[in-house]
């Protein structure tokens, strides 16, 4: 029975591949503050430290010259939010760059990605996590966008795909515009900026490393804050390079700061075939071989190199996830009670550390939210089932 439940919940490929697996997004500061508050509460309860020592520690946290660190033990005692997939194996929350030569089909490609995310239709066999999409088509007008979308999808429209043809510059109006859009559309999953040149301020250091790093850094901070993907379209240089990604126009500051990059190339501008080299912190490097339909301009996937790695089902996560379901949505208990209930052979302390590290996969793949909080009576674990009929939802607390 447990295996059947495990198979039922394991419907999405693992999202933990990459150098930054499990890194905190917008809640990292909250985690630090929360952990410190719990520690203070524990100090008062146990009278282990004096009020003077607590006051000194609070002063250190507010000192701008104080270097905040956490130990490996504290690291394992914290459950960080993982980067959720937008398109499994292709796009995750964070800042991405799609680069290619002019007029090779980048705008049709991002329009296709936008449509699939806004409708929830799988793209090239990859599961899509649906939500609202904002497409800043800053080199187009609405008539051209209308013609393009009609060519691709006919009258099959969606009200979750929004377009704009004008926006502010980064650091000069755009930041506030994006904040307002996400506030009005809290289910936003993807923002497309087409192209980068249209949002950068013109200045003497427009292409310095610091300037390039800062522009992607701003978009990355926004993406991390709201746990969404920001995909920016950019151009490549004409000069060939030893590393194909060195063809991206600008300095290495763009790639250095971005969470992932997609490089689109054609052998001939008139060819219907194209390749996309994909690199990123949260997915395996791969090459996609695409072919375009001449009538609809829709890209189809012919084959891939380096298929994204799919981690096998985790028996511990499978056992934990079986404690909740659509019929019984919550389970609460102490770490000891959890260890005894799932009976994985792991001690309570080891099990909670394991779940802290794997909480992102538990949520993304098994649709179970894991919380481990300090209470007056001791630590309490709470598991919450986060899907209804295979559709994920958010719990508003």
Image (tube, rainbow, N blue to C red):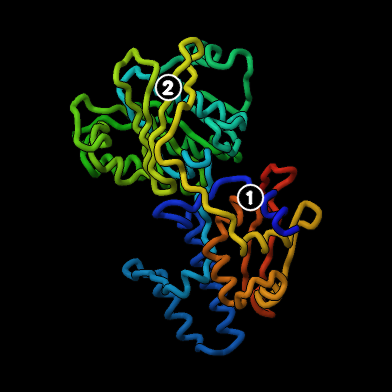
Residue extending furthest right? 327
Q: Earlier in the sequence, mark 2 or mark 1?
A: 1
Give residue 52's mark. Answer: none
Q: Closer to us: mark 2 or mark 1?
A: 1
**Disc 2 to disc 1, how far (Cα)?**
34 Å
Q: Is residue 52 left or right of residue 327?
A: left
One can see residue 97 in this view:
no
Residue 392: % across, % down:
67, 45
Residue 39: % across, % down:
54, 77
Residue at (61% x, 32% y) in the render: 120
Residue 282 vs residue 203, the one in the foreground: 282
Residue 65: % across, % down:
31, 68
One can see residue 21 in this view:
yes
Give the vertical position of 4 relative to 32 (above or below): above
Q: Which residue in the structure is indicated by mark 2?
A: 107
Residue at (48% x, 15% y) in the render: 293
Give the vertical position of 187 relative to 317 (above or below): above
Give the vertical position of 117 relative to 345 (above or below): above
Residue at (29% x, 20% y) in the render: 267
Looking at the rendered image, the quarter that the N terminus falls into is bottom right
Residue 234 vs residue 225, the one in the foreground: 234
Q: Secondary structure at mark 1?
A: loop
Residue at (72% x, 59% y) in the render: 2
Residue 189: % across, % down:
55, 38
Q: Which residue in the structure is indicated by mark 1?
A: 10
Q: Secondary structure at mark 2?
A: helix
Q: Count neighbours of disc 1 (C-alpha within 10 A) and say few if under 14, some if 14 to 19, many if 20 or more.
A: some
Q: Count neighbours of disc 2 (C-alpha within 10 A) and say few if under 14, some if 14 to 19, many if 20 or more.
A: many
């Amino acid at each position: 029975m447990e295996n059947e439940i495990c198979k039922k919940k394991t419907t999405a490929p693992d999202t933990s591949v990459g150098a930054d697996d499990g890194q905190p997004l917008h809640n990292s500061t909250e985690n630090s503050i929360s952990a410190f508050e719990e520690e203070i509460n524990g100090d008062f309860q146990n009278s282990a430290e004096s009020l003077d020592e607590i006051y000194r520690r609070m002063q250190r946290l507010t000192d701008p010259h104080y270097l905040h660190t956490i130990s490996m033990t504290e690291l394992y005692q914290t459950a960080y939010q993982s980067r959720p997939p937008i398109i499994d194996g292709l796009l995750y929350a964070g800042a991405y760059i799609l680069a290619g030569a002019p007029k090779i089909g980048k705008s049709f490609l991002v329009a296709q990605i936008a449509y699939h995310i806004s409708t929830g239709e799988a793209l090239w066999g990859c599961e899509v996590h649906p939500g609202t999409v904002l497409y800043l088509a800053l080199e187009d007008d609405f008539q051209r966008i209308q013609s393009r979308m009609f060519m691709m999808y006919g009258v099959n429209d969606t009200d979750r795909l929004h377009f704009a043809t004008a926006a502010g510059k980064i650091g000069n109006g755009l930041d506030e515009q994006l904040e307002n859009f996400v506030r009005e559309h809290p289910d936003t999953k993807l923002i497309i900026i087409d192209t980068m040149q249209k949002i950068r301020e013109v200045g003497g250091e427009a292409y310095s490393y610091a300037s390039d790093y800062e522009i992607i850094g701003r978009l990355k901070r926004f993406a991390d804050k709201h746990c969404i993907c920001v995909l920016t379209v950019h151009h490549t240089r004409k000069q060939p390079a030893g590393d194909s990604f060195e063809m991206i126009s600008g300095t290495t500051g763009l790639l250095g700061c971005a969470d992932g990059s997609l490089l689109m190339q054609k052998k001939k501008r008139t060819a219907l075939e194209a390749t996309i080299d994909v690199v990123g912190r949260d997915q395996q490097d791969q090459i996609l071989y695409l072919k375009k339909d001449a009538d609809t301009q829709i890209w189809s996937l012919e084959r891939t190199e380096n298929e994204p790695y799919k981690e096998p089902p985790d028996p511990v996560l499978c056992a934990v996830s079986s404690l909740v379901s659509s019929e019984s949505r919550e389970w609460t208990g102490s770490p000891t009670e959890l260890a005894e209930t799932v009976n994985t052979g792991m001690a309570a302390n080891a099990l909670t550390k394991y779940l802290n590290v794997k909480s992102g996969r538990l949520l993304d793949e098994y649709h179970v939210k894991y919380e481990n909080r300090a209470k007056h009576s001791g630590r309490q674990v709470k598991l919450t089932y986060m899907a209804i009929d295979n559709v994920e939802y958010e719990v508003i607390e």
